[in-house]
Image (spheres, rainbow, N blue to C red):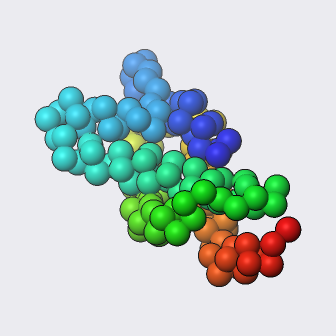
Amino acid sequence: AVLFLVANSFPFLAFDMKGLSTQTTLLTGVVDLWQAEKQEIAALVFLTIELAPALQIGLLLWVLGPLRFGQRPWLLPRVFRLLRHAQTWSMLEVFLIGILVAIVKLLGMATVVPGLALWSFILLIGVLTAAISSFDPEEVWEQLEAGP
């Protein structure tokens, strides 16, 4: 959750081209697409790089937080179903590949400086992937059946 907050709070990339500098954040692309009258694409990008990952992180905390303290998470079956849907729509890796391709293409035209948010985003992908792959709903149910 901390990596997600950092990735959304700090500059993602900075560009310097012929004395003109600009910084981007994760939401800059969504806003630019929206303003360019491409609302459908902006909504899809927002869903896949902001909403779905935030939902994944929040739902994992929803389940694992109470379990940590010996409590039963509220609405657990619905949360598991929603978590599966969020996993399907979360496409951080695809977005990162697109960013890396864009950086390589821009290197010949401008100076590109990666920001703290980019490094946080890369770490977030690894941490979230590890968390999701090690999360076993059956183990959660077994722990709940065993009791405190």
Question: Is residue 100 in sight in this rendering?
Answer: no
Residue at 23 percent across and 48 percent down: it is 41
Position of the C terminus, as image quadrant, is: bottom right
Q: Position of residue 87 (x, y in %)?
A: 47, 65
User: Going by the picture, which residue comes out furthest to the left?
Assistant: 37
Residue at 51 percent across and 48 percent down: it is 54
Residue at 57 percent across and 64 percent down: it is 76
Q: Position of residue 137 (x, y in %)?
A: 62, 76
Residue at 67 percent across and 68 percent down: it is 130
User: Going by the picture, which residue comes out furthest to the right?
Assistant: 148
Instruction: Report whether 45 appears left or right of 75.
Output: left
Question: Is residue 128 in sight in this rendering?
Answer: yes
Query: Disc count in the image?
Result: 0
Q: Position of residue 133 (x, y in %)?
A: 63, 74
Q: Is residue 13 above or below residue 82?
A: above
Q: Position of residue 49 (x, y in %)?
A: 43, 50
The residue lying toward the viewer, choosing from 93 and 13, is 93
Q: Is residue 45 above or below residue 90?
A: above
Q: Is residue 139 above or below residue 14?
A: below
The residue lying toward the viewer, choosing from 16 and 11, is 11
Residue 7: quarter of image: top right
